[in-house]
Every structure is written in structure tokens, then in C-alpha cells.
Image (tube, coloured by chain):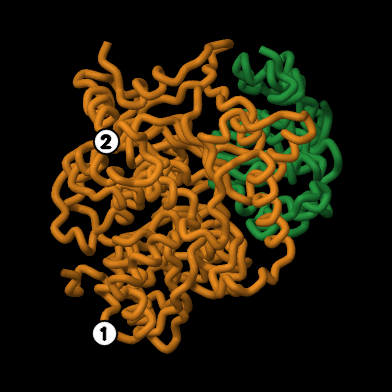
Chain colours: A green, B orange
Amino acid sequence: MKGSVIKYEKDNIDTDVILPGPYLKIHDYNELAKHAMEGLDKDFHKKVKPGDFIVAGKNFGCGSSREHAPIALSCSGIKAVLALSFARIFYRNAVDGAFLLPIEIDENAFRDISNGDSLEIDTSENEIKNLTKNKSYKMKPFPELIGKIIAAGGLFNYKP
Amino acid sequence: MAKTLFEKIWDAHVVDEQDGRSLLYIDRHLVHEVTSPQAFDGLRMNKRKVRRPDLTFATMDHNVPTTNRSLPIVDQTSAMQIQALERSCKEFGIQLFDINSPDQGIVHVIGPELGITLPGATIVCGDSHTSTQGAFGALAFGIGTSDVEHVLATQCIWMEKPKTFEIKIEGKRKNPHAVTAKDIILSIIKEIGTGGGVGCVFEYKGEVVSELSLEQRMTICNMSIEGGARAGLVAPDEKTFEYLRGRRYIPKNYDEYVEYWKENLKTDSGAKFDKSFTIHTDEILPQVSWGTNPAMTADVTGRVPFAQEYAKGNLEEEKAANRALQYMGLKPGTLITDITIDRVFIGSCTNSRLEDLIEASKVVKGKRISPKVQAMIVPGSQNVKRQAEEIGLDKIFKDAGFEWRESGCSMCLGMNPDILATDERCASTSNRNFEGRQGVGGRTHLVSPVMAAAASIYGHFVDVREMDLN
């Protein structure tokens, strides 16, 4: 999985800025995508390209349980969010619907990765290669069941 | 082996275990109009039924207007979501408290009010503030729409067992009318941070907790999620059992349940928690949030902090504080009591119950709100609204210049017409001061109902300890 980075050097990016409340009434996912990250970065929809990754700080996705948040990111093209840590409901929603990969990274990787860097992520090896900087980092492995749900393509495709 | 309350409830609900996760049985599923439409669509697409419609209850609260309910809903997308829930409940045989029901209200207010919420139960809802209901000793937590669909179809949910985190609330409040449950939970979050409880379930313990009413315990459990925990618990006691007695949906053999709860729903002495935090209430003052997350909170006697001072050397925190100060339009060093406000919102699943309104009314009675302020009361449910009207609270508030609205989530999350305009500053009894939460560019200060009421009179924050609240 290859893509380039949109970085937010910020902790506690909440679901209200990932997808502001008024848009929770929208049923059409492509329409939702147009408003992804609108509360934090009005230009997000202009700069995001299919396959991009978001890199962020601690407690990404805190706040409301709205699944619209990972859906909006996913439909705007984001394949993975790399963060120092995740709020649990966001993490779970991202995995349940196989919307995007919530990948936990360490401080070193967080500091090192810059906006616009090109990354290659190999979840089978738990490795993130920074093609721009010619470096590599370790990602925190997915817990066993999470890995299986992701491999199955979401909660409803997963058969225990 | 000695067990915590959480572990007892958890163990009693595990149906299966695999790959380090547990399949948990769900006793009560509450549904609202915003996080459920895609879940019902999913059921239809796969020709599935709702497994236990008798354990599933629905209401509409997030985007209902709080003005005259006999008029049609102007916002068409809201109207469509509301109609979709009506259709789904009819189709799947789910009990719905619709917009015109005498029991309509915020889902976490009506659950306890109708006796749907029970001690020892597992309760889920597609809403992060489901944690509110932990005040009854239930394991109650928010879920996303995929999990809503999963619970509708199976009445179960896959979970990784959370860690346990005890929060001891010790000491004695000198003025419990001025230093409220809201101030306690804001102080806790200020200390442990918004991520302090991630992956954990809180259990609130201590002398102060047993003194608190159920409604106050709900305020504390409600904001567990703001400390990062999906759920917060209080062990049920006599107050809990009496609160629920006689309510509509409690089990018929209620006394037998009470016996079981008394026996089983407490943390054993010697049980170990993974984490522990103690707060002394003697030191707690009325709180006012100044930033854009609930941990960015100050004592009413304090000042808006300098970013550097707030961050204590953490660069990310300093950046976040600078951004927050800019968003909030606040100058560091400003006295909290010098912050003037434009709007007052008393409502939300945190602080919209009868006691909240009674306490706020004591501040307002016989006074007029500042001419510069627009203020509104949004009761948590139609039942709260009726009870308040029976004791004349509506008159007190209206005489003071407040708007007296119909029940719903309202300005807590700005999904209905009740929103802040850009740069408007609001004293709000809700739970989240995130950027844009109450309207694009709106500025939220989280406070207790008495603090909000006092701010409405003076047009700026005041220390309610200086007021007569008895």
C-alpha cells in the first residue's frame, strides 16, 4: 500500500472536526467525503488524493461515536490513519466497516514523517517505509482479531 | 478471586471468547435517528430481522427542532432522518418514542427515566454519551453504526476486555450547590487528560459519590468519554433502587432483582484495578473551560492560561493551546470572570434533568438576564419538561428572559437550528467544547447549570460560591 502523507501535528483530533455535526444528516457517502476534515482543514478535499495517508498525534478520533467520521475519510480517498494513539470508538468503527486502517506509530516515526512524504505500508511485516526519506519504521501490530476482521474486509465479512 | 464491579458485569455477559476477544450479550439497545439509518439499511439488504425488538428502544433527539412541535420540520434532511426512523421501527417492530410522544427526549435521559436502564445490565447505543447510564451500575457504552447493525441482528457485540480504572472522589464539598457534579468531572478530566482513560472503564468511588443523587452521578458518568473511557460506573445503592422503583419498564419481580443487585453489584474488597486516580473535592472550585477540549479548563477564580504555562514543556500541547486560544478569541492572563458571553445553553445529556433545572432556577429567580445575552433552556425530555412546569420552573425562566424549549440534544452538537453564529461565545452546560461543535466558529465554555445561569444574569462568568443558592 503506497501513498503520500497529509500530516497534522496535533493531538485530540475529534470526530466533530473530522466530520462536523450538521453533515451527519447526509446519507450519500460521496457527499460526506466533500466535508471530511472540514472543521480542521477547509482545503482538505482539494489536497487529498486516493490512497493518501493521514499522520496525526495522540487520541485521534476522540469524541462522538459517529461512524460517518471514518466513512468520510475513506470516501475521500484516505487508506490509513497513522497516529500515536486512537480513541477506541473511532478505531473500532474504522475496522468494523473496513473503511481505513488505524495504524499506531511511535514518537520517532511521528516526528520523522513529514507532510507530503511518500510511504509504503506493509501490514504483514508491520513495516512502514518512507520512500522520500529512505527510512523505515515499525508499526504496532494489529491485535489478532482486529487483523482477522481487517483481512476479511470488515465485521460482516468476518467468520469466526 | 476478588473482582471489580465491572468484571462481574462483564463475566456475566460473555457468550463466547475467541482470539483474545469476547462476544458480549447486550441487555438493552437504544437507538436514535442519526446513527441508525445505515444499520437498518444493512439489515434490509441482507434480509435480517432485529433479533430482540423487545430489548430495543428508539427515540429521536439529535436533530429534532426544539421549537413548536405542531409545525412541520423545515430542514428536509432532518425530516427525512426522522421519518426513516419511524419507518424502520414500524417495519422491525421496535418501540419508538417519536417526536410527539409524551416520553420523547434525549436517549440517555429517557433510558433511566423510563426504567429501561437497569443495574448490572449491558447497554449500548450509537452515541458516545451512553456512558451516562453507568450511573446505575450498568455497563453502558457508545458504539458506531456497524456495531448498531451487529447488535440489532445478533444482540451481541465483539469486545476486547477493557482495563479497570478506579476514580476515588474523596473529601467534603463546602458548598455542594456551587461546586457541582459537573465541576467534579471537569476537574477529573483536567487532571487525567482527554486520553487518560483510553481503553478503560472508570469506576467512580468514594464518600462523595454515595452522597450524590442519581442525576448528579449521571452528569459524572456522562463525561467519562471526555476522559477517554468508553464507560464509567457507579456501584448501585439504595438511592439507585429507589430511583428506579415504579418506573415503567423495570422488571415485574423488581424486589427479587434488587436482592440480586445488592448481593452482586459491588467491587469486592481486595479487588485490583489496573489504574487509580484520587481527587479531593475540598479543593475543587466551580470550573469554566477556556479551550477546545474539556481538559482545557480553569477554576472560576483563575485566569486564561498562557500556552507555555498550560503545556508545561510539551510542545504539542503548547501548539494546541495556542490554537485553542486563537479559536476562542481569548487573551492569556484574562480573568475567567472577565470573559463576557453572548449565549447561554442549559441542556444536553450532561445537564438537562430536573435537578439541573431546579438548581439553575434558584440563581435566576426574580432576576432578569443581561440584555446582551440570549439564553435558552432545553429540558432533556418531555417528562422533565412537564415536571419542571408543574413546579413553575418554566415561569421563573421565562420571566427572567430565557427561552423555554422542547426537549432534544439541541445546541450541544448543532444538528438542529439551535446553533451559535461565528465568534458567538456561549456558556454551555453540555459536554464538548470542540471547534465548531455548537456551530461553525462558535465558542463554547463548558460550565455547570448554576454557573451558566449566573453568567446569563451578569453577562460574564461569576463565582457562584458568592451567591445564595440555598
- The answer to whether the residues at label 2 and label 1 have Cβ atoms under 8 Å apart is no
Residue B116 in the image: x percent, y percent? 42, 41
Residue bearing mark 1: B366
Residue bearing mark 2: B236
* For residue B157, side relative to residue B75 (left or right): left
Q: Are marks 2 and 1 on the same chain?
A: yes
* For residue A2, side relative to residue B118 (left or right): right
Residue A52 in the image: x percent, y percent? 80, 38
Q: Quadrant of the C terminus of chain B?
A: bottom left
User: Element under label 1?
Assistant: loop
Q: Residue furthest right?
A: A50
Residue A51 in the image: x percent, y percent? 83, 36
* For residue B440, side relative to residue B165 (left or right): right
Q: Amino acid at mark 1?
A: Gly
User: Element under label 2?
Assistant: loop
Q: Amino acid at mark 2?
A: Pro
* Res A83 visible: yes
Q: Residue at x 61, y 28 (%)?
A: B51
Q: Residue at x 72, y 25 (%)?
A: A156
Numbered circle sitting on residue A67 = none
Residue B447 in the image: x percent, y percent? 37, 63
